[in-house]
Amino acid sequence: MEKTIDESLQGSTLSLDGTNGNTRKLYIESYGCQMNFSDSEIVASILSKEGFDTTQQLNEADLVLVNTCSIREKAELTVRKRLEKFNAIKKDRPHLKVGVLGCMAERLKHKFLEEEKIVDMVVGPDAYKDLPNLIQEIDEGRNAVNVILSKEETYGDVAPVRLNTNGITAFVSITRGCDNMCTFCVVPFTRGRERSRDPQSIIQEVNDLWEKGFKEITLLGQNVDSYLWYGGGLKKDFDKASEMERATAVNFSKLLEKVALAQPKMRIRFSTSNPQDMTLDVIHTMAKYENICNYIHLPVQSGSDRILKAMNRLHTRAEYFELIDNIKRIIPDCAISQDMIAGFPTETEEDHQDTLSLMEYVKYEYGFMFAYSERPGTLAERKLEDDVPDDIKKRRLTEIIDLQRQHSFERIQANLGKVQEVLIEGSSKRSDDHWMGRNSQNTVAVFPKEHYQVGDFVLVEMQDCTSATLLGKAVGYSKNQG
Ligand code: SAH
Ligand code: F3S
């Protein structure tokens, strides 16, 4: 099951094979959303040219970098514990340097560098190209900091080094930042304004991945539907674009089409979609191209109109239902997943019931559900009191999770008896005799290996399931193979 925030990956270290001539070791740990994991691949790429190879052994590291997440308080607390540990290691390895990357950088730079002195370097998500200079600073014994957010930076010209990869699936980032200003969300503050990456550099990366043997890509952005390329710059400045720039602008559905056509045998996914920005042409493009997977991650956060408004989600419950109806009409077997927040300020029992009834209407395949966590600097923190008591938040969250579990089980059972295309990603975690892959809807399927290989597109008859995994048997290759 693909997650916006994959708990099993939190804190993963990334490492790549040694590059000739590099003498220093970088240990890099990533937390939070997929974008952070993808950014760590950019950082490793930049630092490999500065003499650093990555390692998974903390005890041989010369530089430790932590790519941090601020989305909920818990994420920050986890990172802080790790920083304390790394700082303690310095007693035995005095030359070890520790740096903070990502979303905690801006808000906590003074605290980390000056007050607590637990790090040597703080680098925000748009400043990674400055790392060579910053590293020189810390090498010379000074603290280094760059948390400037950019209007232009997309790292479109940095070829990410694929780290800890299965060689089959990869992420390709298409936008950075977010302009939506959902009142609970810290992302617009930590990652800055929204900007899109040059479609040509996206296609080039996709072609390159195909040549290296990758078979599936996920286009990544905080809000992919908002993608808009008109020659560079901020999305919010589009109204100042010239007539020519407007006429040749590429929106998300056009980008999706370009990618689908560039590599017709490559599977294409994208994440995350935002209901207020997802247009019908995106759904039509998905339906038109077989290689675009039938899966949409479509966070809604709440089923109550009043709460949606307080969250500054710019759509109503009825509009969301209309979008869901359109998706199901145009792509009948499309899987849909959600993000939900329980206990947003002022949420009543009635609002909560609206969330549950919205879930009943959609019956999502999966869900990622969170208790509201007040984030410093957000509009909700400034304007609203975090007034839903913890025990009520927890109880509502449990009810949401329980209902999602029922729906997930109902949805997964509907696959039984069907023959579906599965792309093999690797061995099953539980058994070396079984392959693991996903169907188009992003559900994990496991089946006996027989003569099939990693990267094959296989037709699998789905015979049984657990709550999150389909169990089946291969019945041949799909037409996408070979
Ligand atoms: N558009 C982004 C959203 C990033 S945050 C994306 O690419 O997924 C991921 C999810 O975290 C959000 O959809 C929301 O459900 C949850 N979230 C964000 N801020 C939160 C907060 N303050 N408290 C609890 N959950 C939050
Ligand atoms: Fe956050 Fe809303 Fe953007 S959840 S990332 S402000 S779409």
Image (cartoon, rainbow, N blue to C red):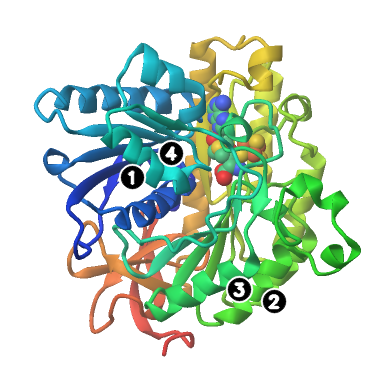
Mark 3–mark 2 Cα distance, whole angstroms, equals: 13 Å
Distance from the alpha carbon under mark 4 to that under mark 2? 33 Å
**Apparent side of residue 388 relative to residue 303 in the rendered image (left or right):** left
Q: Residue at x 36, y 61 (%)?
A: 161
- Measured in 3D between alpha carbons, the distance from the residue under mark 3 to the one under mark 4, in whole angstroms, is 27 Å
Question: Label 1 amino acid?
Answer: Leu
Name which of mark 4 and mark 2 comes first in the sequence: 4
Counting residues from the N terminus, which is met first, the one under dot 3 or under dot 2? 3
Crowd class of label 4 (few under 14; some 14 to 19; many from 20; radius 10 Å) = many
Disc 1 designates what residue? 9
Instruction: Judge the density around disc 3: few (<14), some (14-19), many (≥20) Cα neighbours within 10 Å.
Output: many
Q: Is residue 323 left or right of residue 147?
A: right
> Foreground residue, 285 or 120?
120
Q: Is mark 1 in CB contact (under 8 Å) with mark 2?
A: no
Viewer-proximal residue, 188 or 166?
188
Say above or below: 49 vs 129: below
Q: Residue at x 24, y 75 (%)?
A: 449
Secondary structure beneath dot 4 equals loop
Q: Secondary structure at mark 2?
A: helix
Question: What amino acid is labelled 3 in the image?
Answer: Val
SS for dot 1:
helix
Question: Any mark on residue 32, and which?
Answer: 4
